[in-house]
Amino acid sequence: MKWGAWALVALVACSQPADQRPPEVLDDSAFVQVLTEIQLLEATSKKHLRRDDDASAVYRGQYLAIFEAHGITEATFRASHAWWFDHPELLLPIYDGVVEQLNAWERDWGQIEAQSPPPVRSRTNE
């Protein structure tokens, strides 16, 4: 019984604080960037699929492309997702960051569209 109590004390003393991320988990900034792209993918994925496409393969390939673009693996994303969602008290700034990034992209795309030349109209017989 005595050893069990000491083992418990040692375990508690050596454990990481709730808000300290393990090194294999993406930091808040990187997690926001990946989640933002995933949110955009999920919002638009069905619009890009053709009937003869294997939806799950296309979708999985797009996820893997996001991970590759950020230099992470699917395992890193899954570990990060699990850790962040196990700490809901830390998620509000993550979601705020995702919304801010999506809003910034929307503003940027709106400015680009406003600056692009009008479409060329074909001329009918003059």
Image (cartoon, rainbow, N blue to C red):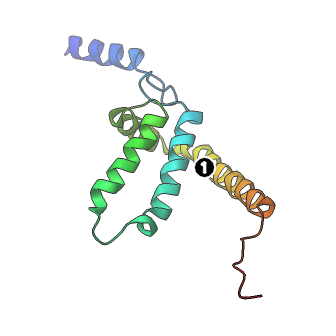
- Helix, strand or loop at disc 1? helix
Q: Which residue is mark 1?
A: 98
**With 93 as the anchor, is 38 left or right in this view?**
left
Return the x and y of residue 69 as percentages of the image width and height: 48, 36
**With 61 as the anchor, is 31 left or right in this view?**
right
Residue located farthest toward the right when viewing the structure as drawn: 115
> Quick check: can you spot residue 113?
yes
The quadrant of the picture occupied by the N terminus is top left
Return the x and y of residue 85 as percentages of the image width and height: 44, 44
Looking at the image, which residue is at 38% across and 40% down?
A: 82
The quadrant of the picture occupied by the C terminus is bottom right
- Is 7 located above or below residue 31 in the figure? above
**With 78 as the anchor, is 106 left or right in this view?**
right
Return the x and y of residue 24 as percentages of the image width and height: 41, 24
Looking at the image, which residue is at 68% across and 50% down?
A: 100
Res 91 → quadrant: top right
